[in-house]
Image: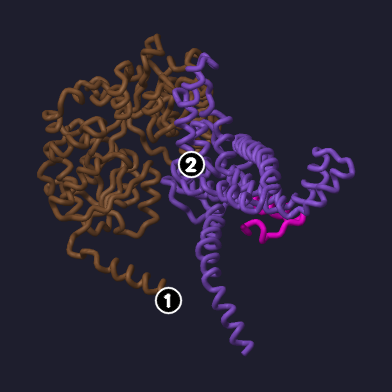
Chain colours: A purple, B brown
Amino acid sequence: MKKESKFFKYLSLLPISFYVIVLIFLPLLYIFCLSFLTTDYYGGINNTLTLSNYLNLIDLVYIKLFIKSFLIAGISTFICICIAYPFVIFVSQKKKMTKNIIMTLVMVPFLTNSLIRTYGWIVLLRKTGIVNTFLQDINVISSPISFIYNDFGIILGMVYTLLPFMILPLFSAVDKIDKSVIEASYDLGSTSFKTFFKIIVPQTKVGLFNGSLMVFIPAIGYFFIADLLGGGKLMLIGNLIKNQFLSARNWPFGAAISISLVLITFGLVKIYQKIGGKMDDLGGF
Amino acid sequence: MRRVFVLLVLLLLVGCSDNNKSELNVLNWSSYIPDEVIYDFEEKYNIDVNYSTYSSNEELLAKVTSAKEGTYDLIFPSDYMVEIMKDKKMLEIIDQNKLKNIGNLDSKYLNLDFDKGNFYSLPFLAATTLIVYNTEVIKENITSYNDLLNPKYKGEIVLLDDQRIIIGASLMALGYDMNETSDEALEKAKQWLLKLTDNVKLFDSDSPKSFLITKEVSIGLIWNAEAAIAMKENPNIKVVYPEEGFNLSVDNYAILKGAKNIDNAYLFIDYLLEEDVMKKVIESYPYCNVNKKTNQILDNTYLSNEASNISTYNFNRATLVKNIGTSIKKYDKIWAEIK
């Protein structure tokens, strides 16, 4: 009897194992192996082993590019935190029904493709766009403001696209805080500023780090936002990887950058576990 | 259980597709042949065309090499990619006797360096990269790449997001050949580009004309068909064949080795070689026409457009992009540096 239940246990694991092995593990293994190979004259793959793809990465050009990408991703994450905290604290004080409605509204943008929503921003913010035309018509500005095709545009796009990924884990963390603890803090004479940093933040740090990971990691790779709202002027790691596969005919180098990025991501997840986060929460809503 | 049932019905429906119709698998640049032309071909010959697209020669190479042989029949590689594919023995020899409309082609575009004798390829369209500018905003006369460095033009330029073309332009601006690979020349080109990027507002290959039309920028270094459309939208936009030289790309018909529908591929090529079919293509995408019979029936809006029609003088000073092998890595690094 016991043997049979074990058999079913393994059987039920079959689809997910298949998924993980065939669609995640094998491609990653392929990329990993590829990153140690070289290219021939036409960009085909040669079966000679080398470390040069990784060594080439240690170059001021690419290090600068990594730093720039991390900076953009970091600033985007910080802005997301600044917007999400007040928002979720506000929502968590509402009635259950209102909470549900507001949180559903947060999800509504996902119904439209993010690429199309990005084009929406272009129509609004370009030189001859709605916002600039309006501001000029009411004489607030004399010449159009460059909202997009610069770093501001990229960060705006990242924050806009990724904000829900910060709000959702942060909300579930803030919502779990016992309201009486916050009341007690006020009763004992604490300011709201102090309450926030001494009571709310420590109790929600896992949710905060979880949300930060979910914003930071995609922000490194979302090259379409850098292309569309940054005017293709700023190259992020995502763009660099894309170029290796689609224009430089240098797949091994692209693979090496990808593997480096995977390692960095692993590092961040390890830090997350160290401060007490559970792996379940990362994909858990 | 119901799900299983629905799945079975779906499978049955898939199985019902018409198997008598023959097929043709085409892999072409995005926005290059109007849907109408393909639809007419399907109707006329009762052939199903499976049409997929790519947006760079490298993407084409990646798609073909990663797919099973026989997945695609007909492709449209540019000059240097024909050379690469020819060398890699990926292309079928084209039997010109099977094409009754082959005489329509302009001999100027035949027998070019990348495929002497046209054994593996025949020209479909040609494109040049030109400077365009809006004379409402830019009062000076622009005639060369070096004119673009004027500090007045800060944030006024759109460039193609294409490393070979743009680095090539900077090499020509400095008096080198656009296929130059020496470290010294490339270093100078990089410095030149770093100066230029102060004036660049954006890089875009998909539709750079729209930034000129919406007046986001007033100068562009873009494909000639894009330039032609922009000029039609705004008559103040002027086109320049840069003094220092410019790039000409010839896109070609080529049949892949192992193609399953070779006869249909010939039918499709021959169909596109017909003058009135090509006219429809050219009217939608006003690149350089390589079909001399089509030129006789095209109307004046196309024929009088300077961007679409390249003069013999300019044709002779245009440069084709060549395969530079592993030196492409140097280009890629410069590209990462200037962005």
Q: Is residue A267 magenta?
A: yes
Identity, as a three-letter code, of the amino acid under mark 2? Asn
Q: Position of residue A170 (x, y in %)?
A: 68, 49
Labels 2 and 1 touching (C-beta < 8 A): no
Q: Is the residue at mark 2 from the same chain as the one at mark 1?
A: no
In front: label 2 or label 1: 1
Query: Which image quadrant is residue A29 in?
Result: bottom right
Q: Quick one: B38 or A64, which is closer to the camera? A: B38
Q: From the image, tell me which residue sits under label 2.
A: A243
Which segment is the magenta one? A264-285
Which subunit holds the residue at mark 1?
Answer: B
Which subunit holds the residue at mark 2?
Answer: A
Secondary structure state at the residue bearing disc 1 = loop
Query: Against A69, is B202 above or below?
Result: above
Secondary structure state at the residue bearing disc 2 = helix
Q: Residue at left 46%, top 38%?
A: B328
* Residue ranking furthest to the bottom: A1
Q: Residue at left 64%, top 87%?
A: A2
Left or right: B55, with A131 as reference point = left
Q: Position of residue A57 (x, y in %)?
A: 60, 42
Left or right: A4, with B138 as reference point = right
Q: Give the numbered dot on residue B1.
A: 1
